[in-house]
DNA sequence: GCATTATTCTAACTAATGTTAGACAGGTTA
DNA sequence: TAACCTGTCTAACATTAGTTAGAATAATGC
């Protein structure tokens, strides 16, 4: 009898081989990208043969899509959990600072899934890109809300565009994948500094501009 | 007799077929990435056959590397030109604002080369990545200097780290490739807003934090 | 017009890719 | 023991990749 619950034909338990395949593939996708990661590479990392992967996934595309979608959801969950731990009625800007740290944390600590998403998105088949955009939109909506709340609370400058602010935030955070090394500052320190720059400004106060 | 000058065996003129190949390839690399862009795709876009490309380039790698290196150099030149047009002794922060606009301009107006670089860097062969890093370092040094000058002039806040500021800048600017559409604000408007946020801060002045 | 050079094509080669069908071993159930 | 299911492997398939050698075409110089 299959170990999985009685609802599905294919194994979808999160503890066994399937999860290991996802983990290994996420790592490879993050490092090498979509097209350069072959099923034989993945199988080799698992100590199996390429054909065996089809017992768990219908195609390379399904495998990759599972990882990339989960990547966003993990970051989303990380941010959501961090927000839930915030006291009721906290300063909206504090909330954003916490969200930035949570996002960076999820991205860099065991963040192969999220990294795979960001790294592979541009080069993935088109239909898959469409579905992925929907998942991204959901996370984007979370940030819209975060920023919107700060706006309503009068905590944001009048001449700052909310969309532009969100784009700058995402850019600063996700771009860390391009350069962040093991010996770099921790996500906490980094998030602290990012918030400092983006919300208080890098210019010395009382400058002539 | 070859049309090119007498120094080289292979054509390296910038006006003919070779340049068209580079242009078409840059567009494809930007759209589809390194591994998903085949020499047959490139040849088809040129109206030629794959084998013919080898008359101009020794390998796919050389072709891609030429484009990616040139991509950075173009942005670099764009910023350099913009800086040269600045008046002597201009405010260092003004210079940075101008540099941001120039970078965005180069990235999005006929910016297939630079976009190809950013899009493909992570998935390119390792030795090539090493060489590319050197080119990137040169451009990075330009920004180090820009920021360093502002720092020395006392125009930057004491508790802002120069490296972090540079990373945030690069992230905000380069991440626009992930979302910028034709109907979005112009590079000038965008650069204006980015500078506004990053240097004056998104928070309303006189807030409680 | 002839020889030479520049440019492109043809046609193949090898290696690698995603994918599939069927065999095999091990354990489980009856 | 016999039947069955799970997980893996074998071995191949069609396709596509980068690359190459040599033929074919077009332009140029004398």
Image (cartoon, coloured by chain):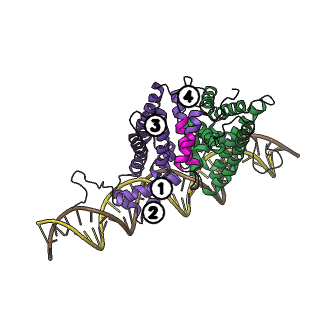
Chain colours: A purple, B green, C yellow, D brown
Q: Name which of mark 1 and mark 2 comes first in the sequence.
A: 1
Outermost residue on the top side: it is A158
Q: Is residue B90 above or below residue D28?
A: above
Q: Which mark is residue A27?
A: 1
Instruction: Using the image, name the chain to which the residue with label 2 belongs.
Output: A
Q: CA distance from mark 3 to mark 1?
A: 31 Å
* Label 1 vs label 2, nearer the camera: 1
- Labels 4 & 2 near each other (Cβ < 8 A): no
Q: Give neighbour class at mark 2: few <14, some 14-19, many 20+ (Cα, 10 Å).
A: some
Q: Chain of mark 1?
A: A
- Secondary structure under badge 1? helix
Residue A70 shows in the view: yes
Which of pointers 3 and 2 lies earlier in the amino acid sequence?
A: 2
Q: Nearer the viewer, mark 3 or mark 1?
A: 3
* Mark toward the start of the polypeptide (3 vs 1): 1
Marks 4 and 2, Cα distance to the nearest angstrom? 42 Å
Other residues around mark 4 within 10 Å, as few (<14) / some (14–19) / many (≥20):
few
Q: Nearer the viewer, mark 4 or mark 3?
A: 3
Mark 4 vs 3: CB contact within 8 A = no
Examine the rendered structure and indicate whether residue A115 appears above or below residue B99. below
Q: Secondary structure at mark 3?
A: helix
Residue hosting label 2: A45
Q: Secondary structure at mark 2?
A: helix
CA gap between label 1 and label 2 equals: 10 Å
Cβ–Cβ under 8 Å for marks 1 and 2: yes
The answer to whether dots 1 and 2 both sit on one chain is yes
Residue B132 in the image, given as x and y percentages of width and height: 66, 50
Q: Which residues are magenta?
A: A168-194
Residue pointed to by mark 4: B182
């Amino acid at each position: 009898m299959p170990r999985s619950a009685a609802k599905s034909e294919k194994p979808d338990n999160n503890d066994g081989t399937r999860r290991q395949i996802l983990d290994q593939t996420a790592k490879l996708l993050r490092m090498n990208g979509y097209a350069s990661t072959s099923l034989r590479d993945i199988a080799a990392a698992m100590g199996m043969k390429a054909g065996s992967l089809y017992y768990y996934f219908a195609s390379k595309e399904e495998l990759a899509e599972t990882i990339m979608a989960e990547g966003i959801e993990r970051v989303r969950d990380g941010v959501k959990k961090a927000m839930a731990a915030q006291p009721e009625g906290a300063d909206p800007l504090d909330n954003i600072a916490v969200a930035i740290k949570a996002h960076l944390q999820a991205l860099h600590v065991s963040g192969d899934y999220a990294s795979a998403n960001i790294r592979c998105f541009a080069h993935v088949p088109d239909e898959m890109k469409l579905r992925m955009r929907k998942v991204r939109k959901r996370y984007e909506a979370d940030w819209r809300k975060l920023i919107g709340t700060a706006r309503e609370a009068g905590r944001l400058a009048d001449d700052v565009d909310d969309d532009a602010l969100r784009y700058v935030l995402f850019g600063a955070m996700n771009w860390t994948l391009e350069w962040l090394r093991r010996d770099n500052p921790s996500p906490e320190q980094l998030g602290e500094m990012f918030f400092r720059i983006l919300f208080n400004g890098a210019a010395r106060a009382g400058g002539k501009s």
